[in-house]
Image (cartoon, rainbow, N blue to C red):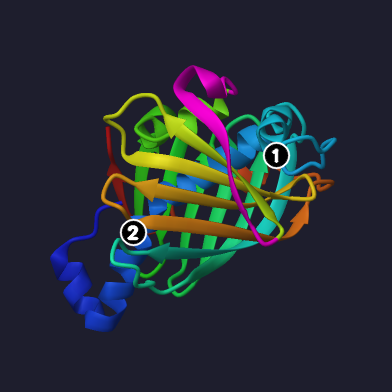
Amino acid sequence: MSVTNKALQAKGAPEAAGRQVTQSWRQTAVLGAALWCSLGMASAAWADPVQALRNFVKDVKSAQASFTQTVTSPDGKKARKSTGTLEFDRPNRFRFAYTQPIEQLIVGDGQKVWLYDADLNQVTVRGMSQAVGASPAALLAGGNLEKDFTLKAAPSAGQIEWVEALPKAKDGQFQSVKVGFTAGQLVALELLDSFGQKSRLDFQKVDTKVTLSPSRFTFTPPPGADVLQQP
């Protein structure tokens, strides 16, 4: 979703800065949701993390969780954190709701991705393949991980075992994607983009037994909202 300089200035410098940070996370948000759609959150017979990742592709059909998202700039300084909730229903339906510091909603209905900024009352609409096609999201959601990625176990950190997925194509937006497991469950997602910025999602209150209404994955623009169609 693009936001004009005029709109940012109207909101004031501090809020504008926070909004620009949040915008930089949106690709991570879409990717995180698509990863959930493909990987699930179910426990698996624990072997090595790479095999666990392969197994997860076929396990869970739906889930919901809360998350904390943090971006670390290339120089190591942390930007403001963002929090929210995530729901998914495979294949390719997800709802990513940011609650702090700025209220924003990302809904994937299987065909389109809707990005809603409540403060600006602005909606951006893109096709599903266009929204995630430039990232590893579409590849991972397709379930054929090793066609486009080289998978390897990465060093563990505390109780988290990491799998690193390195894209075979060198012209993408991301250098690598790391998926973190604890006791066989997916608990974290970390991306390193082509500019050296690191984005991390930590999941909490995971429920893989939930039945989600189809209405959770539909979106109707609010009255008076500016709707921007993007190719």
Disc 2 crowd, CA 10 A, few/some/many (<14, 14-19, 20+): some
Find residue 127 and report its horizontal and vertical position in percent: 39, 31
- Answer whether residue 129 is magenta in the image: no
Question: Regarding mark 1 in the picture, which secondary structure is present there?
Answer: loop
Find residue 88 and report its horizontal and vertical position in percent: 65, 43
Which region shows up in magenta?
143-158
- The image quadrant where one finds the C terminus is top left
Find residue 108 and report its horizontal and vertical position in percent: 52, 40
Residue 23 is marked as 2
Find residue 183 and report its horizontal and vertical position in percent: 80, 50
Kindly identify which residue carries mark 1: 40
Q: Are the two marked residues, 1 and 2, in contact with CB atoms closer than 8 angstroms?
A: no
> Is residue 212 positioned above or below 117 on the image?
above
Question: Regarding mark 2 in the picture, which secondary structure is present there?
Answer: helix
The amino acid type of the residue labelled 2 equals: Gln
Question: Is 229 on the left or on the right of 211, as rendered?
Answer: left
User: Residue shown at 28%/38% (left/top)?
Assistant: 230
Of the residues under marks 1 and 2, which one precedes in the sequence?
2
The amino acid type of the residue labelled 1 equals: Gly
Disc 1 crowd, CA 10 A, few/some/many (<14, 14-19, 20+): many
User: Residue shown at 56%/33% (left/top)?
Assistant: 152
> Is residue 215 positioned above or below 90 on the image?
below
User: Residue shown at 38%/30% (left/top)?
Assistant: 133
